[in-house]
Structures are given as structure tokens and as C-alpha cells.
Image (tube, coloured by chain):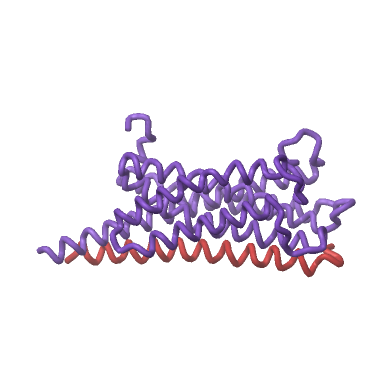
Chain colours: A purple, B red
């Protein structure tokens, strides 16, 4: 695996890297979140959405990051399944619980925005339904891993599930184009669709969520590496 | 500042804060617990 990043192929190197990288990403996330929220709360009310536009600053980043996390989960699962890479398996396992958390946030904040704007907490719209399916995929991944005692079997089964679930990512992304949807299309990357007064805090909040995920993912992977090392040490102690 | 929509905006930010806090505490507790366990076992 010469093409893999050096830290990914060596747990010791990864542990040394993540020891300083995890808090660094955490601090970056905190600073960006403070700046983004300050800009978001000082922005004027939207002429259509009113003050609810502020929910967008936490909803859109959660919705974007939960798809990104699934892509990370799928890549890590592929590496774990094909190359039987232990650290990749740790990364996949660590990503799943975070992905579930961010998807939950996307669904709940979207619902709290939808009630005053659409007049409904929930509609069986293609975008909403496909994001709900994403949440269920994360839960199923975690449940599958927890249900099997044999960790190698659990890892393989969960990796296959994660790879099958990749089909949902383009469905989420293009759902607003493929079907008539109540959910609006992407405005963040469409030139002129979003006024700079909303675009900048949104971009900053996206970076804050990305940094937060980076930090939490590294901490979670570290925990998983420690867990596997502890279990290996326990087995050695039993055999001694 | 939040006007008539405060009932939707405040819970959205509150739930986000709680979920973030939960994810941070869970990640740190998980890492700390297994690191200590590994260190205990390594000493034996």
C-alpha cells in the first residue's frame, strides 16, 4: 500500500500524529464556530425565511458532513475489507457513530426549520427520506458490528453493508433534481444564489463542522486502537 | 432578534449543542477508558 498516506499504514505513526492533530482540529473548529455563529447571528433576517435563516448555519453543515462521513466510512471499509487493514477498520468503526450523530442533527434541525417554513415537521420528500435512510444505514452498521462476537466477521459484514449503502449518496445529492422535491436545491455552490452576508457564515460553519469531525474522528480512532491493544494485552496476559 | 421563530431556533441550537457535547464526551471517555485499560494490562 505504497499509495496510502504513511500515517494510515502504521498505527504508531498514526497515534503520534493524532496526538497533536486531534486537539489542533478541535481548537480550529471552536474558533471557526465562534466566528461563524457571530456572523450568522449578526446577519439580517431573510426576507422570506425571517430569523429561521439562522437554522441554516447549523443545518446545512450537518447535512453536508453526514454525507462526507459516509464517504469516509465507505473508503475505510473498502480498505479494511480488501487489504484487511486494522487501522482502516478502526477508522470505519469510529466514523459510524459520528455519522449517526451528524445525520441526526441534520434531520432534527431540518425539521425545526421545516415546521415554520413548510408548515410540517416532516414530509416524505425524496431528500428527507434518503437522509433518513442514511441515518438508518449508520444505525444498522453500528448494530451489525455490535451483534457479532467475532470481530473479524463483524468487520467484514459491516464493511459490506457500508459499501452497499454508498448507492444512497448520489440519491441524496441528486434527489432534488431527479424528483419534484419540496426541499430546495443546492444554493451554496451556485454563483449568486446566496447573498454574501449568508454565504460567508455558512462557509465558515461548514469548515467548523469539518474540523470538529476531524478532531472527533481522530479521538475515536485513537480510542479504538487503545481498545484493540488492551484486548490483545488481555489475551497475552491470559495466555501467560 | 429571533422574534416569533424563537421556539424553533432555540431548540435547534440547543439540540445541536447537546449532541456535540455528547459526541465530545463520548469520544474522550472511550479513548481515556481504553488507554487506561491498556496501560493497566501492560504493567502486569
Give percent across and percent down for residue A82.
Answer: 34, 40
Residue A54, image quadrant: bottom right
Which residue sits at x=50%, y=60%? A139
On the rendered structure, is A71 left or right of A84?
right
Q: Looking at this view, is A45 or A114 the one in front?
A: A114
Of the pair A42 and A76, the residue shown nearer to us: A76
Which of A19 and B15 lies nearest the eye of the viewer? B15
How far across and how far down the image is residue A80, in percent? 35, 44
- Quadrant where the C terminus of chain A lies? bottom left
Residue at 32% x, 57% y: name it: A226
Q: Quadrant of residue A105?
A: bottom right
Query: Taking A9 as reference, is A55 above or below it?
Result: below
- Number of labelled discs? 0
Residue A78, quarter of picture: top left
Measured as percent of width and height from the top left, residue A178 is found at: 70, 41
Give the answer, above or below, for where A2 lies relative to A213.
above
The answer to whether A6 is drawn above or below residue A14 in the figure is above
In this rendering, would A24 be left or right of A30? left
Amino acid at each position: 500500500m505504497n499509495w496510502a498516506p504513511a500515517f494510515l499504514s502504521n498505527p504508531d505513526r498514526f497515534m503520534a500524529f493524532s496526538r497533536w492533530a486531534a486537539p489542533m482540529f478541535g481548537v480550529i473548529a471552536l474558533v471557526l464556530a465562534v466566528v461563524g455563529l457571530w456572523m450568522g447571528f449578526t446577519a439580517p433576517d431573510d426576507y422570506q425565511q425571517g430569523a429561521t435563516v439562522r437554522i441554516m448555519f447549523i443545518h446545512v453543515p450537518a447535512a453536508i458532513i453526514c454525507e462526507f462521513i459516509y464517504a469516509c466510512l465507505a473508503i475505510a471499509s473498502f480498505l479494511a475489507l480488501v487489504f484487511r487493514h486494522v487501522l482502516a477498520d478502526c477508522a470505519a468503526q469510529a466514523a459510524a457513530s459520528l455519522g449517526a450523530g451528524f445525520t441526526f442533527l441534520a434531520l432534527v434541525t431540518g425539521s425545526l426549520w421545516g415546521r415554520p417554513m413548510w408548515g410540517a415537521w416532516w414530509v416524505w420528500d425524496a431528500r428527507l427520506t434518503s437522509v433518513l435512510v442514511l441515518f438508518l444505514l449508520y444505525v444498522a452498521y453500528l448494530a451489525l458490528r455490535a451483534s457479532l462476537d467475532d470481530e473479524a466477521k463483524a468487520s467484514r459484514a459491516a464493511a459490506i453493508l457500508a459499501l452497499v449503502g454508498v448507492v444512497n449518496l448520489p440519491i441524496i445529492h441528486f434527489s432534488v433534481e431527479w424528483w419534484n422535491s419540496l426541499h430546495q436545491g443546492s444554493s451554496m455552490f451556485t454563483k449568486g444564489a446566496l447573498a454574501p452576508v449568508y454565504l460567508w457564515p455558512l462557509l465558515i460553519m461548514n469548515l467548523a463542522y469539518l474540523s470538529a469531525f476531524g478532531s472527533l474522528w481522530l479521538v475515536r480512532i485513537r480510542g479504538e486502537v487503545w481498545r484493540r491493544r488492551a484486548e490483545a494485552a488481555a489475551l497475552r496476559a491470559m495466555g501467560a | 432578534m429571533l422574534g416569533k421563530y424563537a421556539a424553533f431556533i432555540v431548540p435547534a441550537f440547543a439540540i445541536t449543542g447537546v449532541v456535540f457535547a455528547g459526541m465530545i464526551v463520548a469520544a474522550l471517555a472511550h479513548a481515556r477508558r481504553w488507554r487506561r485499560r491498556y496501560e493497566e494490562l501492560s504493567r502486569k
